Amino acid sequence: MIEFKNVSFDYGDDENKINALKDISLTIEDGEFVAILGHNGSGKSTLARLINGLLAPSRGEVSVDGISTVDSSAVWRIRQQVGMVFQNPDNQIIASRVEEDVAFGPENLGCEPAEIRARVDEALAVVGMRELAHFDPHLLSGGQKQRVAIAGALAMKPKYLVFDEATSMLDPKGREEIVATTRRLNSDYGITVIFITHIPEEAALAGRVVVLSGGTIAMDGTPQAVFADVDALADLGVGVPKARLLARGLEQAGIDIPDSILTVDDLVAALC
Amino acid sequence: MRFGLTIGEYYPVDSPVHALDPRVKILLVLVFTIAVFAVVNFSGLTAAAALIVGVALVSRVPIRLAVKGVRPLLYLLALTFIIHLFTGAKPWIELGPLHISVPGARSGALVGIRLVILVVGAAFLTLTSTPIELTDAIESLLAPLKKVRVPAHEIAMMMTIALRFIPTLAAETDKIVKAQASRGARFESSNPVTRARSFIPVLVPLFLSVFRRADELAEAMEARAYRGGEGRTRMRRLEMKGRDVLTLISATAVFAGLAWFGRLPLV
């Protein structure tokens, strides 16, 4: 369980302080797939970095399984428990061979060589990159690089995975690969996923959507509940999935259509 | 399969030289260098050249790839030779206004050939070992020096990251050069000053980007529980086999023989 208790975070010194997060309280249960949705400057990346102790809260407390992230003796344990995939695929791959990079995390944890080998092979198999284990990462596509980054996090055997806008620099195909992988990790491997994004379509696939705006939680609920209020979301600057917009347009035009539609698949099912 | 940029152009074939422990190869290059510097006659240099040809045959690497490394040294070689030619001792040969030293010609030729042999010999290290193998080998060889505060792990990590980012930054430089050229930068100008100045708008964005990448990479490394070499293990471990030890000992003996032969009063 990840818990934020009245967490605030300020950037900069006292004179030009930027208040990125304001008194956030949030609980993420084990096994959840939570999307954190917000536009630029909403504080979502700050929130991501608070979970694994890359940043320490200015006020309040963040805890992972009951251990505070500011507890310096537990920070490595927390980083092992909370894997993280960042935005830029190029700037998080350390080694010039895929399997070497995936081995980086378990090597840092001090695992035995045979154990590292086993973890690397398994992690690469989970993301479907086993055949490319000997490749140089710069020859891979963006989506493949992000899958290597996911494998790198998985090799640490984490309980939680945080994706910090991990799809925003990818083409549509790469984006699809990553979204599909994250859903599989959640459903088949029971990993709790915290998926930070500014894309409503991606958030709609989560079990729970938390909308962040101006450093506070503006909405928190199922995608159906959150995306029901199209106008409110537009005010928060995040928008709703296009399928939802289209469904609402059809509804206003007098066509009988359920208001739970969030994805193109839903739309196809309802119309055809 | 191997593509893209690598330092020293690894030549991927299977051979006993390729299979040799990279630490042995690095040590042997050092021993070979010392031996060649000890050689003071042409017979010894010929023998050293013959040894290199032997290594080339065993490693199945075309020798011209190793010789290619000499090309950037040609000016240096010519300059060294000329300096020796005019600054040697007696007897002198007078060619009009030029005074040429006979022993100078000999020592100039010795130094030049010695340099060529060293460069060609050392090239086989990078031609037969991948950059990853070399990085591991350097970390392993430097490990005993940790006691005297040589940052062995940090040096290896820097090499790893440098190797990882060379192709990325090469691609980025190319992109910036094209972007600036399309905005009128004069990279092709015949005036060297204009040409040099046109690279400033390439270097500034490149450096900014490198710093941004370094920041993000540091964060990603921290997120993966990186805390320096302390307590860190490795997936691959270099293993010195009987064959490697044997090669190290016998080749060292051969190089010692080379040094001895090279100091005999021969031509």
Image (cartoon, rainbow, N blue to C red):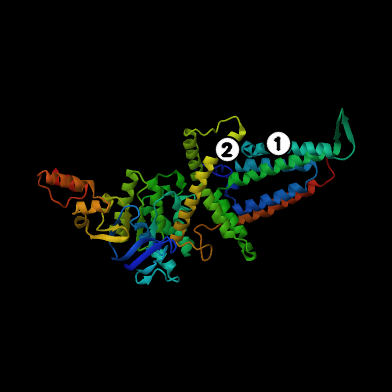
Q: Residue at x 68, y 51 (%)?
A: B30
Left or right? Give the position of B215 relative to A225. right
Residue at mark 1 to residue at mark 2: CA–CA distance: 26 Å
**Circle 2 residue:** B197
In which chain is the residue bearing label 1?
A: B
Mark 1 Cα within 10 Å, few/some/many (few <14, many 20+)?
Answer: few
Give the residue furthest to the front.
A15
Q: How many marks?
A: 2
Secondary structure of the residue carrying tag 2 is helix
Residue B245 seen in the figure: yes
Residue A37 locus on image (x, y percent): 29, 55
Image coords of residue A26 (percent x, y): 29, 65
Q: Residue at x 52, y 52 (%)?
A: B161
Relative horizontal placement of residue B40, taking residue B133 as reference (left or right): right
Q: Position of residue B171 (x, y in %)?
A: 48, 41
Q: Which residue is mark 1?
A: B75
Circle number at residue B178: none
Type of amino acid at the residue the image marks with label 2? Arg
Element at label 1 = helix
Up the image or down, B116 lies above or below B22; here it is above
Q: Chain of mark 2?
A: B
Q: Residues within 10 Å of mark 2 (few under 14, many from 20)?
A: few
Q: Is residue A138 above or below residue B138?
A: above
Could you tell which of marks 1 and 2 lies nearer the N-terminus?
1
Quarter of the image for residue B88 reads: top right
Q: Are marks 1 and 2 on the same chain?
A: yes
The residue lying at 74 percent from left, 47 percent from top is B36
- Of residues B251 and A247, the one nearer the viewer is A247
Extreme residue toward the top, this view: B96
User: Do we see residue B239 in this rendering?
Assistant: no
Amino acid type indicated by mark 1: Tyr
Give percent across and percent down for residue B118. Answer: 70, 44
